[in-house]
Image: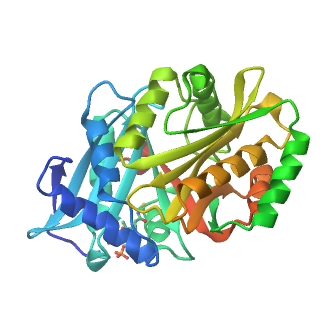
């Protein structure tokens, strides 16, 4: 094993080293997917501020791996505080020019120690896998993590095929008589806020989570508004569509557009309450948000979505809309005591 004289330094969004910390992420993302713009810096800065601010739904901390004067690795830990209080979410990247020298290993050891200090026993991380043998997968396997969830990424190249979209809409409208479609941007209407919180809670229990060590999340109106404000501050527009029956929101879908890179949008959560399934509401709200999105952001060239392969209804909706496979996203977990770590 190579040893490296790397120093691990605490950083935060107000620090002089933070732009270099963000640049490690940009370089790592470009190495994995050279034809896609990396996340804008605003994403990291605003999340970093939220993690430092007391009273929000997440705490967290950042470390930079520094070699000489250069930041060569980036670590972010996120600790949910309202639920899942045994879990630490780990984001870890090493600059492509400094890999295979133990920097990732050093940051991971630090993550384990910090998780222990925070009283957390379960660690979760995610790896983008454009193709086979992604470095993150090989690293996680080597470090003893377990792949707990494997999702297929599917991309829809825009503009969407009008014939396909119209066919999905026609079928959905037919099957969903009695339901009304509503759309909104960034902030759910007050009248639907409590229902939106319930749907978010259901996302944490009803959407497939594989073997991830996560429990039901606790959502209320205030947490929905906190998340909405965070997205606005991050420079994201969130376009949403919902299905309403008897004045109650029973299904929703979110589509995230980063204003710094509108060319590539990402599908957020989609959920239909159990008791309202079988009416093509998933297709209904997805088609509605695609219509709104085409009007609001004609510059978007691609939308990415992530599904567990076993989630047949969602995969079928996406394929009927023209989404095609574009790699995988894997989620990995590790129990701290498995390694006998501190
Ligand atoms: C994954 C990542 C953080 C590894 O960083 P790193 O500094 O190269 O990792 P290390 O040098 O500490 O590697 C530790 C061990 O992991 C394994 N490993 C890491 N990268 C590997 C690769 N590309 N191929 C095969 N094995 C690899 C090796 O066993 C390595 O030990 P060795 O070099 O002594 O054989 C880096 O590739 C990266 O930033 N990838 C993109 C972001 C990402 O996927 N993050 C998720 C991390 S869980």
Residue 183: percent from left, percent from top: 63, 38
Quadrant that contains the N terminus: bottom left
Residue at left offset 43%, top offset 67%: 139
Quarter of the render that holds ligand 1: bottom left
Q: Is residue 65 left or right of residue 303?
A: left
Residue 283 lies, with reference to residue 120, above or below; the image says below
Residue 232 lies, with reference to residue 322, above or below; the image says above
Residue at left offset 60%, top offset 20%: 191
Q: Is residue 70 left or right of residue 156?
A: left
Q: Is residue 222 left or right of residue 321?
A: left
Residue 263 lies, with reference to residue 196, above or below; the image says below
The residue nearer to you, when weighing 1 against 167, is 167
Residue at left offset 41%, top offset 55%: 259
**Which residue of the protein is positioned furthest toward the right in this rendering?**
174
Quadrant that contains the C terminus: top left
Residue at left offset 85%, top offset 44%: 173
Residue 212: percent from left, percent from top: 57, 45
The residue nearer to you, when weighing 87 against 36, is 36
Residue 134 lies, with reference to residue 261, above or below; the image says below
Q: Quadrant of residue 317?
A: bottom right
Q: Quadrant of residue 156?
A: bottom right
Q: Is residue 308 left or right of residue 218?
A: right
Q: Is residue 165 visible?
A: yes
Residue 184: percent from left, percent from top: 58, 38
Residue 45: percent from left, percent from top: 27, 49
């Amino acid at each position: 094993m190579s040893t490296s004289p790397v120093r691990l330094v605490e950083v935060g969004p107000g620090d002089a080293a933070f732009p270099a910390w963000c640049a490690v992420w940009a370089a790592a993302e470009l190495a994995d997917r050279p034809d896609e713009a990396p996340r804008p810096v605003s994403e990291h800065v605003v999340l970093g501020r939220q993690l430092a601010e007391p009273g929000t739904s997440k705490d967290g901390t950042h470390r930079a791996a520094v070699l000489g004067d250069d930041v060569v690795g980036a670590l972010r830990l996120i600790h949910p505080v309202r639920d899942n209080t045994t879990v630490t979410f780990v984001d870890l990247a090493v600059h492509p020019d400094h890999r295979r020298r133990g920097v990732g290993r050093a940051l991971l050891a630090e993550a384990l120690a910090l998780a222990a200090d925070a009283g957390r026993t379960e660690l979760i991380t995610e790896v983008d896998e454009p193709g086979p043998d992604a470095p993150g997968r090989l690293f996680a396997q080597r470090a003893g993590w377990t792949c707990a969830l494997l999702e297929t990424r599917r991309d829809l190249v825009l503009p969407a095929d009008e014939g396909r979209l119209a066919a999905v809409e026609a079928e959905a409208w037919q099957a969903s008589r009695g339901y009304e479609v509503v759309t909104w941007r960034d902030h759910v209407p007050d009248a639907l806020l409590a229902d939106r919180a319930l749907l978010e809670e259901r996302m944490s229990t009803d959407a497939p989570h594989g073997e991830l060590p996560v429990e039901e999340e606790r959502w209320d109106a205030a947490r929905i508004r906190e998340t909405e404000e965070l997205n606005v501050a991050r420079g994201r527009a969130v376009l949403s569509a919902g299905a309403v029956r008897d004045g109650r929101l029973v299904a929703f879908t979110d589509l995230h557009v980063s204003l710094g890179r509108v060319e590539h949008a990402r599908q957020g959560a989609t959920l239909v309450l159990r008791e309202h399934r079988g009416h093509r509401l998933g297709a209904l709200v997805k088609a509605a948000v695609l219509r709104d999105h085409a009007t609001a952001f004609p510059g978007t060239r691609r939308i990415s979505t992530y599904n567990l392969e076993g989630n047949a209804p969602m995969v079928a909706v996406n394929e009927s809309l023209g989404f095609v496979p574009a790699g995988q996203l894997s989620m990995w977990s590790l129990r701290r005591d498995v390694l006998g770590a501190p």
